[in-house]
Amino acid sequence: MSEPKVAGSTPLAIEVESGQAYMWCACGLSKKQPFCDGSHGQTDFRPVLFKAEKTQTLYFCNCKSTKKAPLCDGSHKKLNLKS
C-alpha cells in the first residue's frame, strides 16, 4: 500500500479539548476515522500526533490528501470523489 485509502470525501468536524493528544489516521484504514485504531499494522503509514492547544472545533482531513496533516486543507475538492 503506497497510497492511503480515502476514508471520506469531506472533512470531519471534531471538538478537541485543550491539552489532549489525538492520533490521526494517515493510512485511511481505521474504523474510527479520523483517528487511528492500529489498522496501519503492515503498511508504511504511521498515525500523526496532534496536540490541541485550545478547546475548539477543528476539521480533520478524511481524504488523506492534505498537506497540513491532520487538518483539512481543501485537498478533497481537487479529488474526483463523491460525497
Image (cartoon, rainbow, N blue to C red):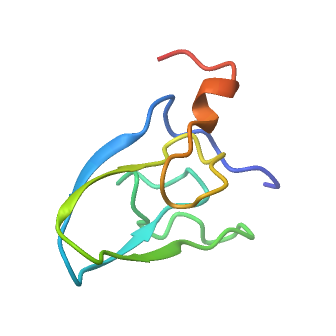
Quarter of the image holding residue 32?
Answer: bottom left
The picture places residue 74, in percent across and down from the top left corner, at 56, 36
The residue closer to the viewer here, 64 or 59, is 59
Q: Residue at x 59, y 32 (%)?
A: 76
The residue closer to the viewer here, 58 or 36, is 58
Q: Which residue is drawn at 22% across and 73% down?
A: 54
Quarter of the image holding residue 16?
Answer: bottom left
Figure check: 83 above or below 79: above
The answer to whether 21 appears left or right of 67 in the picture is: left
Quarter of the image holding residue 18?
Answer: bottom left
Q: Which residue lies furthest to the right in this view?
A: 2
The picture places residue 27, in percent across and down from the top left corner, at 61, 57
The picture places residue 51, in percent across and down from the top left corner, at 36, 79
Q: Residue furthest top?
A: 82
Q: Which residue is drawn at 77% across and 50% down?
A: 3
The picture places residue 21, in percent across and down from the top left corner, at 32, 80
The residue closer to the viewer here, 82 or 73, is 73
Figure check: 63 above or below 20: above
Q: Residue furthest bottom?
A: 19
Q: Which residue is drawn at 41% across and 66% down?
A: 37
The answer to whether 16 appears left or right of 75 in the picture is: left
Quadrant where the N terminus lies? bottom right
- All told, the count of numbered labels is 0
Figure check: 13 above or below 49: above
The residue closer to the viewer here, 9 or 43, is 9
